[in-house]
Amino acid sequence: MNDDTIMDLEDRAHVVIRPPLLWFLVVASWGLDWLVALPFVPAPWPNIWIGSGIFAAGFLLALWAFKQFPSFREDVDTHTPSTVIIESGPFSVSRNPIYLGMLIGILGAAIAANTLWILLALVVWYPVMRWGVIAREEAYLERKFGETYLAYKRRVRRWI
């Protein structure tokens, strides 16, 4: 490996998993519901509509945040170097609006599917996301951008 290749390997967050892969956890937990149903919403409740609405809100938040990246010639991929701190749009109120959108989407999916299995998946999802992805991204951004990122952290909350 040459020096440029080594630098490229170091100039990233080293997250434990690519966040979109965590959706497989949701799909697997929904599959568990076919084996052992664990409903938690009363039967006459219109859970499919409410859950779908919550899921859509999470999806739209994540999409809005995702669409900020091309404006800054930035890549959303956690395995590529960051060149700028995005502070506009949803990033002005949450440092992690894509992940917040995922969390809202998972809650909506649990309500729409009426299964506790998806909520139980959060027992795995949240710690992996919080410490295996977000903490590593934050440490990387602090190393790379220093006081600029620390000032952003002081102004904007992690979730909401």
Image: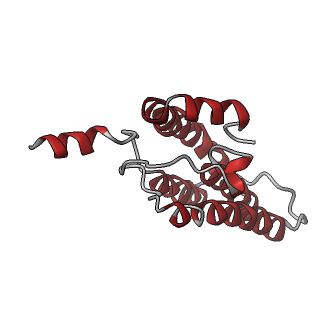
The residue lying toward the viewer, choosing from 81 and 13, is 81
What is the x, y in percent for residue 86?
59, 51
What is the x, y in percent for residue 140?
43, 34
Residue in the picture at 63% in, 59% down: 65
The residue lying toward the viewer, choosing from 45 and 80, is 80
Residue in the picture at 43% in, 29% down: 143
Compared to 150, does 72 lie above or below?
A: below
Residue 88: in sight, yes or no?
yes
- Image side of residue 33 versus residue 53, left or right: left
Residue 115: in sight, yes or no?
no
Rendered-image quadrant of the N terminus: top left
Figure coloring = secondary structure
User: Furthest-right residue in view?
Assistant: 44
Rendered-image quadrant of the C terminus: top right
Residue in the picture at 51% in, 34% down: 138
- Image side of residue 12 versus residue 159, left or right: left
User: Furthest-front residue in view?
Assistant: 148
- Image side of residue 104 versus residue 70, left or right: right
Compared to 126, does 70 lie above or below?
A: below
User: Furthest-left residue in view?
Assistant: 1
What is the x, y in percent for residue 19?
48, 51
User: Furthest-bottom residue in view?
Assistant: 49
What is the x, y in percent for residue 10?
28, 37
Quadrant position of residue 105: bottom right
The residue lying toward the viewer, choosing from 116 and 131, is 131
Number of marks present in the image shown: 0
